[in-house]
Amino acid sequence: MTDERELIEFVRAQRWFASRTKDVVHARVVDRAVLREDDPRLELLLVEIRFDTGTHETYQLLADETLDALADPRHVRELVSMIRQSIKLPASEGVVEFGAVSGFASELRDARPVGVEQSNTSIVFDEELILKVFRRLEAGINPELELLRFLTAHEFENIAQLAGWYSYTGRQMDATLGILQQFVIGRDGWEHALDTMGEGAGEFIASARRLGEVTARMHSILGSDHSDPGFAPEETSAESLGLLTATVDEEIQSVFLELPDDVPELEPIRGRGEEVRERLRVLTSVGGAGRVIRHHGDFHLGQTLWADGDWVILDFEGEPARSLPERRRKRSPLRDVAGMLRSFAYAASASMQLRGVEPQAGWELRVRERFLDGYRDTVQDSLVPTGTAMDRLLQVFELEKAVYELRYELNHRPGWVSIPVAGIVRLLDEEIPG
Amino acid sequence: MSEPGHWFERDPLWFKRSVFYEIHLRGFFDGNDDGSGDFRGLADKLEYLQWLGVDCLWLLPFYPSPLRDGGYDIADFFGIHPDYGTVDDFRYFVDQAHQRGMRVISDLVMNHTSSDHPWFQSSRTDPAGPYGDWYVWGDDDSRWSEARIIFLDTEPSNWTWDPVRGQYYWHRFFSHQPDLNYDNPEVQEQMLNALRFWLDLGLDGFRLDAVPYLYERDGTNGENLPETHAFLRRVRAEVDARYADRVLLAEANQWPADVVQYFGEGDECHMAFHFPVMPRMFMAVRREDALPMIEILESTPPIPDNAQWGLFLRNHDELTLEMVADDDRDYMYEEYAKDPRMKLNLGIRRRLAPLLDNGRDEIELMHAILFSLPGAPVLYYGDEIGMGDNIFLGDRDGVRTPMQWTGDRNGGFSRSDFEQLYLPPLMDPVYGFQAVNVEAQLRQPNSLLRWLHGLIALRKEHPVFGLGTYEALRPDNPRIFAHVRTYEDDIVLCVHNLARSAQAVELDLSRWHGFVPEEMFGRSRFPAIGDLPYLLTLAPRGFFWFQLRRDESE
């Protein structure tokens, strides 16, 4: 049996381990499947990590003699080969099922891990395919598989086509374990923005309009199928705005309650929690709220590629820190729009912080405008409210996002805290639309 | 699609950690503008329930019924009352609830049917026919006189003469609800078929209504008979054999020592309501004395590890006073039912907020106590916003008025004409929908709804409340109800001030010397536990919950 200490130490050291702030007290393998018997032996482990209060999370590990088999290209090729063959393998308790969606090259040679990732582990093959292994597992279909299937079926072209998936069905839970997609060669949207922040900004600013159009088309398609209850657009209910207010307000309250005392970057917002909540109350007294649909859920420049003069949208998992039922909730598509607006703000700040490059004057404002123009001109009208109601709702979601970022940065990247702080301050200072 | 396992992590003990929410389907939300709540309407409100954070919805009976007893008079165990929709609507609703991480259980009445049920109609007209023996018939009404009459206000006897068959039939509840004859194996089998039918549609379990009365035996009061327990064991075995992670919740309004029999040896019901603790909570806050609660919890026998108590403040029935002594009942009536209209049978037909004179501190205190006790709390729809009641409506309808969603027409419950509504919504200045509604309370950061939402979230972060041990502390100050819950490394100290005045209390926490109490709502750290008794001061009706943390600096 795998040693408990070793499991805990391994998991706690991983970037994808979600609960760094909690105390881990136990770890156990709840199910295992031998994916390959012969040398090199490969095993899939579902590991339950228990915290001091008695709650737990479940993670996927792939193990050879180490717990980090994904570092070995032979093993990841094996996983892809099983997806291609659409095979089913028994685990001790459940079943691991592999499924192929579309054809792909039979011979895979080169496999390289993708460097910067927070919640998963991805490996690129021959610059043609990418395998994403979900680490934290939750019961139910992963939104990424769900949305990619839907968008593929509805002929949305600005995504990396789904090639296959693998999943677990068993006593413990049913969960998506990983997906295989086409690897699209292009420039990461975030890098693209930073690279062009100084002199060559014109190209990116021009492409922002197209990003708005692609985003709007994605939303229009996601809200187009009334026959599928999982995707049918819904009218916002009488208490939708109340629910939104309550959700964001509680997030603000809890983040401000837990602000650490020893982070100087927090000074501009320290003690201003009530002011932020008041602003939220004013903003949410809007008229209509449009409709709610399935949407991207964690939309920012890092989830896009600029490829052959068009945008490709990636990573439909939703915000990893939220529970799966929460990520699958239908909400206003303007959440995605606000996410991208926040990302422009991030890029502008990061340009100085990471590259020492002062963004071209008015960069963020111009990018925002182009992006919003493209979005407004393209989106299916019924999905979003009009006029100042839309502007206000966007600010609500920007605020929600900035607060989410603040919590995330405090837990994971303290050096970046000043960016959401600046975002919150700006929203406080901004005039209220209408 | 509706296989619940698909959307949940496997956990046979999920119900132990869960917060339940009881819904009167007719009164929740009207999805088709006909004046009555329905499954489509309920599905529209799942967004709200998901936000609220409740884990399991308990639905009052939704089966075809003449509705002479709120649907507890079932006329077909395999259908949906047309007012509520169709079986497809039901399936859709359950699937949507599962996708949002909520489970669904429903009421099922095994003891009796409506007198409109075709089985009864056949039984009375054709005594020799296939259903002749499905009910309990007798030539005279003198048998089993030891069995008490439950609905004292309406029923003179447990026997009613049927002129069609020319015999008396037995009924423990209303005379239009004849008891099924469980000595007939066909009745048992058909009831199991009904359970399977709904479980196959994805339902996560049942609240088994009126479960102590299934059998009748000479020389007994007909309650809690061994035959009844044997049948429940059979039900449990059938459920366990074919379905994962389902729950059977017994409604047995009995003393704890009798109720624990319904858990069997972990082989009957998963859950049972703890009826006696509830009136004692109300007594405790009126008398400012923790003793009634401490005593009833002390006299509650231990239950199997795989079982759980269901705890509640109020539900769709009257606040039952069957499980209190006569003088305590008089006290309760005097304190909580000053108007005789408020009494019903052996109970008080009022909602939580009016019972507590709409006192916010009292409502919060009662919820805090409820959530801190060993068991799974069961909330009653509308109580999360502090809805009132209408004692001028008949029977228990006064606590079953439409859910108040907004300040708009019909309280946002229905777009039908007012006259069409199944019951009028509350419109008085204190509890009416213009003053008390979900929409307004969602927007008010300090509303009861928002507070309760936080309480539910906190409870879910700490499985100790559902799974932990319970140990009463007995401080010298009798106005303080304090106890410690422990599960794995989580130690929670709950201290409640039952008094209308501020109180100080010294607690003996010497076992946790050096631990630091961290208040759980605001995360403030209190002084470490030292050599002296731990001194706390509490505001009137105030309470503290602390997580006792090892001091890392030591």
Image (cartoon, rainbow, N blue to C red):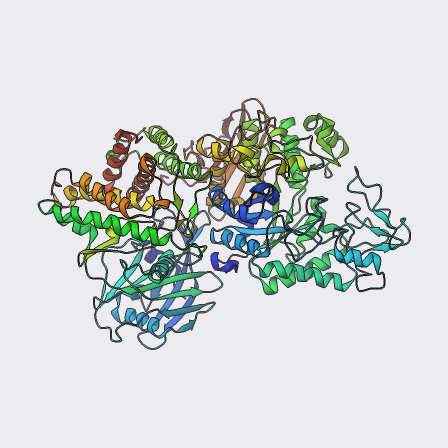
Q: Identify the image quadrant of residue B505.
A: top right
- Say if B173 sits above or below A284 in the image: below
In-image side of A21 versus B76 (left or right): left
Extreme residue toward the bottom, this view:
A38
Q: Identify the image quadrant of residue A39.
A: bottom left
Residue A266 visible in the snapshot: yes
Write the residue at 37% across / 41% down.
B552
Write the residue at 45% across / 35% down.
B521
- Residue A334: x and y, percent? 33, 44
Write the residue at 60% across / 27% down.
B479
Extreme residue toward the left, this view:
A199
Total numbered labels: 0
- Residue B33: x and y, percent? 56, 42
In-image side of B231 versus B533 (left or right): right
Write the residue at 26% across / 68% down.
A72
- Residue B169: x and y, percent? 84, 52
The front one of A39 and B106 is B106
The quarter of the rendered structure image containing the C terminus of chain A is top left
Residue B468 visible in the snapshot: no
The front one of B549 and B81 is B81
In-image side of B106 versus B54 (left or right): right
The front one of A64 and A268 is A268
The quarter of the rendered structure image containing the N terminus of chain A is bottom left
- Residue B52: x and y, percent? 49, 41
